[in-house]
Image (tube, grey):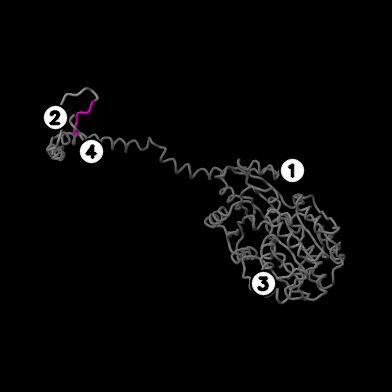
Amino acid sequence: MKFADLGLSDELLQSVLDAGYDTPTAIQAQAIPSVLMMRDIIGIAQTGTGKTASFVLPMIDILAHGRRRALMPRSLILEPTRELAAQVAENFEKYGKNHDLKMALLIGGVQMGDQVKALSDGVDVLIATPGRLMDLFERGKIMLNGCDLLVIDEADRMLDMGFIPDIETICSKLPATRQTLLFSATMPPVIKKLADKFLSNPKYIEVARPASNNSNIVQHKVRMPSRAKREVLRHLLRTDNVSTAIIFANRKTTVRDLAKSLQQSGFSAGEIHGDMDQNARNAELQKFKDGAISILVASDVAARGLDVKGVSHVFNYDTPWHPDDYVHRIGRTGRAGATGRAFTFVTDEDAEAIANVEKLTGGKIPEFQLNVAEPAAAAEAPSKQRRAPRAEKPERKPRGAKAAVVEEVVEVAEAPVRAEPPVREPRAPRIQRDEPRPPRDVLPDLPSAPGEWNGPVPGFLSFSAL
């Protein structure tokens, strides 16, 4: 089957051909005709299957007819992250170049003024993250009652990020008679409930088992102690024919530290994580896409939003805490028919996490045996070398012996000095000064029984003779 068989317009087909595509993927072949027929869709597909184009292409032809109105977008695409929203915007620019369509990107981390101005001029396609959309809606800067087409992308990721209540609110503000397309890699009960509530007689399309693995990706797990991770990573980067790689870590601090370590080791590495503002993240992504850097260290904020051609390797520096994230991480390689390799580092603490990943993917991940043992040994060697001088007490004995001899000599030399009476002379005056006492009214010394007081009478006591 070719794109020409899917019912797309000639102008759109030309844009697709100019982009270098001729044959649709499985999800595209099944979804595009149904979207053009104005049917609601539930699309279950793993990442990297061409899912974005399966709704972008038919939307361009549908929106080619109609007119724009201020503050009232004609269609809405909800994305969980800024990176995914930017990726969809790039698709619209690429495939819609032969159409007179206006698009607005509504995401956090950028100035709101330009976004409001674009809405005021009227847009055909609004691509937004739920948080920023709700913010503008509550400020009265946008109206949703003119939106006839809604796309909820990466619905399971929306669930993970806590956006489901916002999505329900947004859906309630849209016209009841609209077309809704929902795409997700998995279908947990909450997402199924959402689909049952807001979709009307949808066509269910599933091109692969949920969370199944891309057959174009060769996967490995590498067991090691935590202290060996960096050395093993450097070894694989140097020996496994890596052209471009994305390295995922669970924590933002790990991302920063690892990127700095790789740079110090001579690798061309950048970083992207949630603590960076949007402009900085975009700059790092662009450098990676342009080839200015060949390695990108990332947190899961980028796991579902990166679409870079030719990524040869994905490294899970940390085994992901959530099994679904494993599928989305490794999906950054092996895209569009290309092959890729994915390595997951597994420590003793990751036993439960890797077991959950293998349970979700339906099979054991082959264990990769390093050809040499040096990486792990090298990781331990520095620490042992640093501890060795302190542990080698026999080597320090000569110094200790000399010190002991010196101390004995000092003791022999100083003993007569310390034994001389003049050494204690400073204390003698203090003893002499303490001897004279001012006269006090005291009772005469009387014999006393054991335990009875026979000292001076406190001044606060009074006596009377009877």
Pinpoint residue 416: horizontal percent, then vertical percent. Answer: 16, 34
Q: Residues within 10 Å of mark 1 (few under 14, many from 20)?
A: few
Instruction: Indicate left or right for 275 with 3 as reference.
Output: left
Pinpoint residue 407: horizontal percent, then vertical percent. Answer: 25, 36
Say which amino acid is labelled 3. Answer: Gln
Residue at 70 percent across and 73 percent down: it is 119
Say which amino acid is labelled 1. Answer: Gly
Residue that label 1 marks = 363
Residue at 75 percent across and 68 percent down: it is 144
Instruction: Measure the C-alpha gap from mark 3 to mark 2.
Output: 102 Å
Q: Which residues are magenta?
A: 452-458
Residue that label 3 marks = 115
> Viewer-nearest of labels 1 and 4?
4
Instruction: Measure the C-alpha gap from mark 1 to mark 4.
Output: 92 Å
Tag 4's secondary structure?
loop
Q: Earlier in the sequence, mark 1 or mark 4?
A: 1
Q: Earlier in the sequence, mark 3 or mark 1?
A: 3
Instruction: Measure the C-alpha gap from mark 1 to mark 2.
Output: 101 Å
Pinpoint residue 381: horizontal percent, then vertical percent. Answer: 50, 43
Q: Which mark is residue 460?
A: 4
Quarter residue 390 falls in: top left
Residue that label 2 marks = 444
> Viewer-nearest of labels 4 and 3?
4
Q: Earlier in the sequence, mark 1 or mark 2?
A: 1
Q: Is residue 457 a member of the stretch shown in magenta?
A: yes
